[in-house]
Amino acid sequence: MHDSSIEDIKYVTDKNEVLIRIELCQWKQADYDESQPERQEGILFFTQVELFKIEPASFQIDSNEILEIRLNNETENLEFILAGVNDIGKVSIVSNHVDWREIN
């Protein structure tokens, strides 16, 4: 997902769901096939969310480049490290399930 961007994040607290809209930069990936589109938009749909946090709290989500993704195997915490306008942000999620849904 490096060089891809997070376009938007919605946290649905009453359903414990997080929806992350991502624009994947497919052409920069090692397994890219030129018959595929260069970019693909989709949503990571997290359910049964136990933890959702954006740090710093003032960090704005708006087409932020994904710099790195980390997974802590012990805590099952997934972290997206994002570039901001003037800072670096971190989105942390712990959930029991995630699906990818393409947007056409």
Image: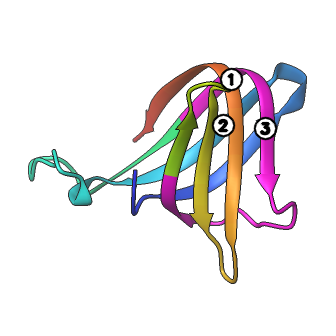
Span colored in magenta: 44-68
Q: Amino acid at mark 2?
A: Leu
For the residues marked 2 and 3, what is the alpha-carbon distance in whole angstroms? 11 Å
For this rendering, which residue is in front, 70 or 31?
Answer: 70
Q: Amino acid at mark 3?
A: Phe
Please state the horizontal and vertical placement of residue 13, each as a whole percent of the image.
88, 30
For this rendering, which residue is in front, 50 or 47?
Answer: 50
For this rendering, which residue is in front, 55 or 101?
Answer: 55
Q: Amino acid at mark 1?
A: Ser
- Taking the spot 75% from the left edge, 24% from the top edge, the residue there is 49
Residue 95: image tag: 1
- Taking the spot 68% from the left edge, 26% from the top edge, the residue there is 75
Relative placement, left or right, of 91 versus 66 is right
Q: Is residue 81 above or below residue 11?
A: below
Q: Earlier in the sequence, mark 2 or mark 3?
A: 2
Look at mark 2 in the image and give the residue it sits on: 19
For this rendering, which residue is in front, 25 or 56?
Answer: 56
Please state the horizontal and vertical placement of residue 55, each as a whole percent of the image.
79, 57
For the residues marked 2 and 1, what is the alpha-carbon distance in whole angstroms? 12 Å
Question: Can you name the residue that lies furthest to the left here?
Answer: 34
Look at mark 3 in the image and give the residue it sits on: 52
Q: Is residue 53 magenta?
A: yes
Question: Can you name the residue that lies furthest to the right here?
Answer: 14
Asked if disc 2 and disc 1 are in contact, CB closer than 8 Å, the reply is no
For the residues marked 3 and 1, what is the alpha-carbon distance in whole angstroms? 9 Å
